Structures are given as C-alpha cells and as structure tokens.
Image (tube, rainbow, N blue to C red):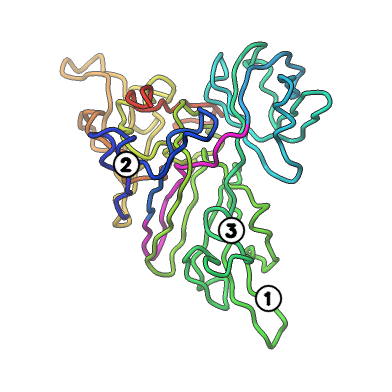
C-alpha cells in the first residue's frame, strides 16, 4: 500500500505538511491536508482519516434519551438531506461517534441515531460535521472528471473495483461504479451488488468504520479534509471488525492507548487482536496479553502472534489507514483509540 503523504508528520509535526489554510474555518476543523491511499489488485483494508470540516460545536443543555438540546444556532447550521456525524468530545462518552437522525432548529435540538444518555451528560461538549460519502471520496456520477474517483470501471460489477462497507452485523454493503449498457438501457453510475442504482451523495461512509477496496487492478484514491484531533471510540459488534485507523500520521500501538480498552487475557487467542495488512496478502497481528504467573520471564504487554514481546512505540499505523480488530470473545463493547500526543498542540 502506498505511503501516505502525511507520514513524516510523526517526526516533523503535522502542521509542516498541511495544504492550504484552515484559518477561515471554525477552530476545531484545523488542521487540513490530504493523503494518497494506494490499493492493489485484491483485498485492501483502508479507512477515511481526513474528514469534512465541522459545521457546529458546543455543549449540551439537556439530554432526553437520544435527543440533545443545544445552544441557539447549532441546529440552524444543519441542512436537510445531509448526513451529519455527532462526536462527543468530553465527558464519559468522549470519543463516541453517531449520526444525527433529525434536527429541529426551532427547538434547538438534534436527535441522534443512538441513545448516548447513559454517558453523555448536560454540559458535555460535541462537534457536528457532515459525513463523508461515496461521492465525496470516490466521485459522483455528475462529476465527469472524477466519476468513480479513478476506480476501475467496466460494464460488469464483478470486474469493477468495489468498495465494501461493513454493515455492523458481519456483512457488507458493496458498491462499484459500473459502465452502462446502451443495448439494455442500463445507465453508467454507482450500483450495489444487486445492480440497483445508488445515489453516491446520499451513501454515508462513517470514518470509524473501515472500507474494503476490492481492486481489479492497482490504483490510488486521494482523500482531503480536516484532521481529527480527539480520541475515537470504536464499537466491536462482530468477531471481525473493520475499522479506520482514524489518524493520518503518528499513530502507534503505544500512542493509541488501546491496551486500556481492548480485552486482555493471558492468551493471545482469547485477547482482542489488531490485524495490520502487510501489503502482500498477510497480516501482522498484535494483542495486549497479560503475563503468565507461572513463567518468571513473562511480562504483560503487546505481543505478536508468535508470542514475542513487541515495543508498541515501533508499530506504526501510518501505512495502514484501515485495520481489522478481532474480538476475543462474544461480548459487544467499545474500545477507544487515543490520538498521538503531538496532536494536542495542533
């Protein structure tokens, strides 16, 4: 997988590689930049690590199950027909990401797809930003210059590059940009695996979820937008969970602090595991494993699949925009990925 354009940021600081200026945007949208995500023929595990700029932020006034009362002007900034992400940034729910189901500008309220009321309290802060979509990442049918975003496009779904989006239940919604057939009246555009037309601008891609790009050939996708600065909570709902690595540069196992929320047992096989593609069809696998009390040489810490101790500071996510989190048991849970420490200065 091609090195992303922000990789050196871990050494020189992300701001040194920024493109353009975020000075005119709301302060929590900074910094901005771009990265090139390369893919090869076959299965590629990728994620969206640059995002739409926030359109609103603030603190909750009251919480009524999934409905959050917000300050005057917050709901006014939202536009009907756009999918928005609600990101909790403080309090017990910090890191949680959900979608805005509806909003009421007159009542100064937003209703969320998930009920955060057990953890999101009065006065907790949030950010609201538009979700990325098939159109914003890969191009829309109306964008002739970028239709399909450079993905290989043929007259058959099966021979096109495909984007597989996890459905949270172990399956995938599958999309491809397919060429039309003048003899059957089929139009060129985004299709699902059943051949139905898809409105790319309305098909949200949630950045906490990974995307599997099934490449018919090698290619690149250039993603631009704002860098997420705060921690993100990932929901582990199935055995194999496809997730974005969230941060475009500087994230390591040590910086992620995932050891604080992943299931950790005395066995690699029963601990939650992180699988990072090696770019050659295999994976480097890691888990945070508890020491064996019967082995004096054993220590609690990150291990690889062979049981070797691993220095978490040496395992970088820079070249892995998407990862697989393999749940160690059957319990649905949230795990939190912390941002690299130097992001606090951005």
Q: Where residue 256 sits: x, y (%)?
A: 36, 27
Identify the mark at residue 174; answer none if there is no mark.
Answer: 3
Residue located 58% across and 58% down the image: 174
Q: Nearer the viewer, mark 1 or mark 2?
A: 2
Question: Which residue position holds label 1?
Answer: 187
Q: Where residue 268 sits: x, y (%)?
A: 33, 31
The part of the chain drawn in magenta is 38-55
Q: Nearer the viewer, residue 37 or 174?
A: 37
Q: Nearer the viewer, residue 35 or 153?
A: 35
Question: Separation of disc 1 and disc 3 at Cα?
Answer: 18 Å
Say whether disc 1 or disc 2 marks the residue closer to the N-terminus. 2
Residue located 54% across and 71% down the image: 158
Q: Quadrant of the N terminus?
A: bottom left
Q: Where residue 193 sits: x, y (%)?
A: 62, 64
Question: Which residue position holds label 2?
Answer: 17
Crowd rating for badge 1 (residues with CA inside 10 Å; few <14, some 14–19, many 20+): few
């Amino acid at each position: 997988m091609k090195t992303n354009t922000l990789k050196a940021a871990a050494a020189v600081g992300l701001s040194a590689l920024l493109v353009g200026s975020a000075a005119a945007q709301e302060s929590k949208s900074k910094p901005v930049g771009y990265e090139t995500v390369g893919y090869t023929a076959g299965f590629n595990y990728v994620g969206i690590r640059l995002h739409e700029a926030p359109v609103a932020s603030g603190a909750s006034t009251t919480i009524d199950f999934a409905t959050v009362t917000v300050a005057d002007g917050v709901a006014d900034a939202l536009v009907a027909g756009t999918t928005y992400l609600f990101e909790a940034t403080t309090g017990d729910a910090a890191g949680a990401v959900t979608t805005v189901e509806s909003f009421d500008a007159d009542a100064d309220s937003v209703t969320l797809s998930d009920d955060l009321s057990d953890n999101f309290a009065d006065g907790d802060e949030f950010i609201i930003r538009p979700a990325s979509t098939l159109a914003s990442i890969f191009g829309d049918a109306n964008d002739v210059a970028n239709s399909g975003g450079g993905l290989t496009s043929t007259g058959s779904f099966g021979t096109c590059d495909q984007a597989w989006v996890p459905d949270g239940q172990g399956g995938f919604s599958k999309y491809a940009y397919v060429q039309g057939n003048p003899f059957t009246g089929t139009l060129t555009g985004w299709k699902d695996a059943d051949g139905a037309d898809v409105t790319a601008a309305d098909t949200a891609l949630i950045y906490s979820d990974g995307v599997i790009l099934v490449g018919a050939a090698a290619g690149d996708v250039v993603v631009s937008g704002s860098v997420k600065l705060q921690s993100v909570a990932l929901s582990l709902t199935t055995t194999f969970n496809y997730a974005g690595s969230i941060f475009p540069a500087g994230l390591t196992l040590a910086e992620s602090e995932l050891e604080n929320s992943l299931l950790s047992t005395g066995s690699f096989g029963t601990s939650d595991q992180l699988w990072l593609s090696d770019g050659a069809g295999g994976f480097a696998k890691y888990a945070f494993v508890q020491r064996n009390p019967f082995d004096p040489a054993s220590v609690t810490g990150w291990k690889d699949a062979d049981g070797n101790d691993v220095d978490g500071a040496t395992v970088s996510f820079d070249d892995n925009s998407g990862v697989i989190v393999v749940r160690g048991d059957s319990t649905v849970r949230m795990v939190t990925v912390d941002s690299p420490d130097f992001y606090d200065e951005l």
